[in-house]
Amino acid sequence: MAEPVTIARPYAEAAFRLAREQNALSAWSDALALINAVVADAQVGALIDAPNVEPAQLEGVIVGAVGKHLSGEARNFVQVLVQNRRLGLIAQIRDMFEALRREHEGTMEATVVSALPLADGQLQPLMTALEKKYGRKITAKVELDPQLIGGLKILVGDKVIDATVRGRLDAMAAALTH
């Protein structure tokens, strides 16, 4: 059986191609986020795999929840996903769409993981340094992880910059045991 990412890719590429042709990348990002939020709901998620729920009923639930916020093309996209029983892949489709969008716009996404909330002026110098290093516009997503004890861990693409106290302690422990 094919991996979910492999199945989701053509849908993400089709949505991206359509969004780019319509010059509506932002609107499609919003639409995919809305659809994903509805599908992530436990009650709706249970309907996706329920054998007694007809595709038209499932489509009605999704469109009923967010239909007024979707363009006609986005509603058609939901219909295609439901008919092909691919609605459960919306999270992967959305992630791939966003990756295609960032590549198209020449941006990268950085995930900054910190033990404590960052002060207002701390994030911008960090993003400026990352933009200089990678030569691209960087958008940041900040996450908190108290287990880091202190410092930051930055994930950009497939690179990890670990400047955390936890990372240093782990490195020292590894050095002492080898």
Image (cartoon, rainbow, N blue to C red):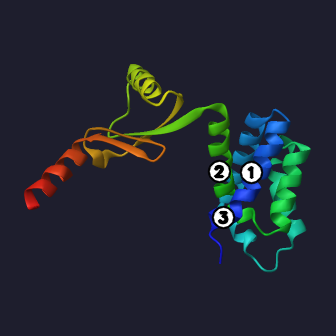
Residue 120 position by quadrant: top left
Disc 1, disc 2: CB below 8 Å? yes
What residue appears at the point 66 percent right and 44 percent down from the top-left corner? Answer: 100
**Tag 1: amino acid:** Glu
- Identify the mark nearer the N-term, 2 or 3: 3
- Residue to which mark 2 is pinned: 96
Extreme residue toward the left, this view: 176
Instruction: Tell me if I can see residue 42 in this picture.
Output: no
Residue 26: x percent and y percent?
73, 34
Callouts 1 and 3 close, C-beta under 8 Å:
no
Image coordinates of residue 113 in percent, x first then y, are 39, 41
Q: Residue at x 73, y 52 (%)?
A: 12
Mark 2 neighbour density, 10 Å: few (under 14) some (14–19) many (20 or more): many
Residue at left offset 54%, top offset 36%: 108
* First in sequence: mark 1 vs mark 3: 3
- Tag 2: residue type? Met
- Inter-mark Cα distance, 1 to 3: 11 Å
The Cα atoms of the two marked residues, 2 and 3, are separated by 11 Å
User: The N terminus lies in which quarter of the figure?
Assistant: bottom right
Residue 93 horizontal side relative to residue 55, left or right = left
Q: Position of residue 123 (x, y in %)?
A: 42, 26
Give the residue type at disc 3. Answer: Thr
| Residue 119, quarter of the rendered image | top left
7 with respect to 54 (left or right)? left
- Badge 3 is on which residue? 6
Task: Name the quadrant of the C terminus.
Answer: bottom left
Q: Secondary structure at mark 2?
A: helix
Q: Which residue is denoted by mark 1 in the rendering?
A: 13
| Label number found at residue 41 | none
Question: The residue tagged with tag 3: helix, strand or loop?
Answer: helix
